[in-house]
Image (cartoon, grey):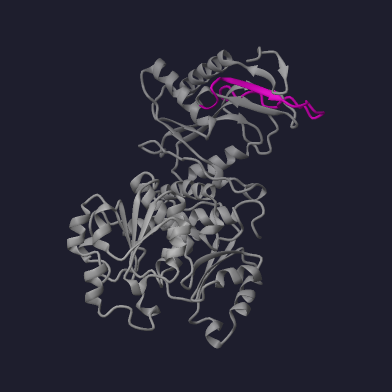
Amino acid sequence: MSAPSETTDEGRVVLDARDIARALTRISHEILERNKGPEDLVLLGIPTRGVGLAHRIADRIAVTEGITVPVGALDVTLYRDDLRQHPARGPQRTEVPPGGIDGRTVVLVDDVLYSGRTVRSALDAMSDLGRPAAVRLAVLVDRGHRELPIRADHVGKNLPSARTERVMVRLEEYDDHDEVRIAGTPGSDTTGTDTTGGTEGS
Amino acid sequence: MKKHLLSIDDLSLDDMDTLFATAAEMHDVQRREVKKLPALRGRTIINLFFEDSTRTRSSFEIAGKWLSADTINITGKGSSASKGESLRDTVLTITAMGVDAVVMRHSASGSALQVSQWVDASVINAGDGTHEHPSQALLDAYTLQRRLGTLEGKRVLLVGDLTHSRVFRSNVKCLTRLGAEVTVVAPPTLMPSGVDAWSREAGFATSYDLDEVLPQADAVMMLRVQRERMSGGFFPSAREYTVGYGLTRDRLAVLGPDVPICHPGPMNRGLEIAADAADAAQSLVLDQVSAGLAVRMSILYHLLAGEGASS
């Protein structure tokens, strides 16, 4: 494996395993702080990697609070507004934890926040499952370039990127190791994100 | 996946896996309070049924509606077809209204293929004569796979009026492709001509003796005796057919309580299947109906949702 700062065809590592662990610990604490405890929380991961991240956050909350927060998966494929622009892709699992989401505080968990369209689809998908009291968004990486007025509540890392670049999140559960890489050439539209990071109520 | 679904031959093994995986997700939607997905919003599907049908037509209609497509039903009776309009003119008229898919059933074998050559829309064969009924075969295989875990190496019996059965033709292709060991059972008069050559090529067995093969079965699929398609006497009496090939109470006892029983419906109770068997705990007849909806949602989604789908 390459050293953290090394640049290869695969791009450079912007978060290594320890960075990811720290970011998730911080997000877990932020979620608890914002919710004033783990009561009525439900974590819904957006497949694929959002589900793994949601489980990790739940594990950390369990260690801190001694309470296991329900975790589910929310597939958004069938709710996407760009279905006709790509070959039809099979939906993945949607699993709502027992007890549902009605009246709960749902934290959507995804790996990368980019255009915001996935989150929009997720909000639509959720409205077919129930009516949460509140919905929050936690992401490991916010790379900017929003196309919709959507902002994350909890962000692992704000990562200024160009549209021409690719951000790749790898997690042990799916890829054998943890890291976030950015690859490709930074184009002229490197904006930096105008997301001021979504830590707590900003 | 191809644009049309005319035959099981249009699907690769990967396509089937994809369809089944999506169907499993669609199955979960049926348990939700809101049974609606926006995937096919703005698409129009015509159900064109020139032959009677309850479950296939309503299944395709609900499947389309739950995916937010606009669905319209046209039946042979009451349409211009009954005034003497040709199939071609009927189909061209309808598709000129800008439909994305035609789900069609017709008494002529090959009619779906013919229609697919006339129109831009996707054509889904919902039964063409005695040729094929691919969505039924897919839902049968999906139902059995869910019950048995896998079809690989499982011995499946298809019993009944094979000559007139499009379900049998599609099912043999689908089940053998998925690794099942298929045996087809029928009286000699209802065994299709040329079945020997086909069975050697496709790798399934034939039998004229139900009692001989029944004890080894992992699943039994009974087929309807299609009296409406029979021009002559294919068996001396209903009683004699039941004695030789019906799934009677005695045969149910031989089968044991764990072997699933399927029937594509409608059932002739007391003829090919006894009420005891149709209503037994191991009967999957109603499971087939709900699975049918999920599988048809999956078919419509994969044919119509993505890039390149007709619009």
Residue B259 rendering spot, x and y as whole percentages:
27, 52
Reply above or below: B20 against B78.
Answer: above
Is residue A109 visible to the viewer in this orientation of the structure? no
Residue reaching furthest to the bottom: B83
Q: Which residues are magenta?
A: A174-202
Q: Is residue A186 magenta?
A: yes
Reply above or below: B104 against A119.
Answer: below
- The one nearer the camera, A125 or B257, is B257
Reply above or below: B50 against B199.
Answer: below
Q: Quadrant of residue A169?
A: top right
Reply above or below: A82 against A52.
Answer: below
Magenta span main SS? loop
Quadrant occupied by the C terminus of chain B: bottom right
Residue drawn at x 43%, y 71% is B193
Residue drawn at x 36%, y 18% is A66
Residue A20 rendering spot, x and y as whole percentages:
56, 18
